[in-house]
Image (cartoon, rainbow, N blue to C red):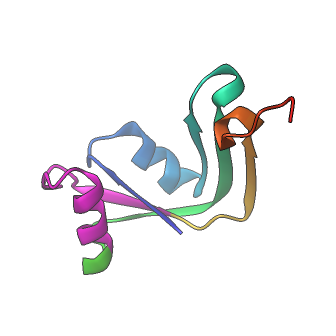
Amino acid sequence: MFWLPTLGSAARLGNVRSHPWLALSIIEGEHDTHAAVLTEGPAEVLATVPEDVWSINGLRNGGRGLDWATAWLRMTPQRLFSYAELAWQGVSPCS
């Protein structure tokens, strides 16, 4: 499950309310050292999140608060694709 903090005025909230589905792409690196995770699934808009989600997101946010997050998107992946170039994993393509 993915929890995404957002502002209550974000256009994406209306989109998710109208069509409760999200596609999420996470990309890191470039060229021969890149990795990607692509996922999609049903989503919903929530005003609050469980305390553990709030705490984990606060830690990932460098200890800065998430008071700006007035809405949350919760997506439950139904499809997932991941890919990583060999160099991203520290493996030489010539080994």
Q: Nearer the viewer, residue 59 or 80?
A: 59
Q: Note whether 80 is above or below 56 in the view shown.
A: above
Identify the magenta region. 53-74
The quadrant of the image that shows the N terminus is bottom right
User: In percent of the image, x 66 and y 40: which residue is there?
Assistant: 90
**Residue 64, position in %: x, y?**
13, 51
Q: Is residue 61 magenta?
A: yes
User: In percent of the image, x 65 and y 29: which residue is there?
Assistant: 33
**Residue 59, position in %: x, y?**
24, 60
Q: Is residue 17 magenta?
A: no
- On screen, residue 7 versus residue 63, left or right, reads right
User: In percent of the image, x 13 and y 55: which residue is there?
Assistant: 65
Occupied quadrant, residue 43: bottom right
User: In percent of the image, x 48 and y 55: which residue is there?
Assistant: 17
Q: Nearer the viewer, residue 43 or 61?
A: 61
**Residue 84, position in %: x, y?**
72, 41
Occupied quadrant, residue 60: bottom left
The quadrant of the image that shows the C terminus is top right
Q: Note whether 30 is above or below 3 in the view shown.
A: above
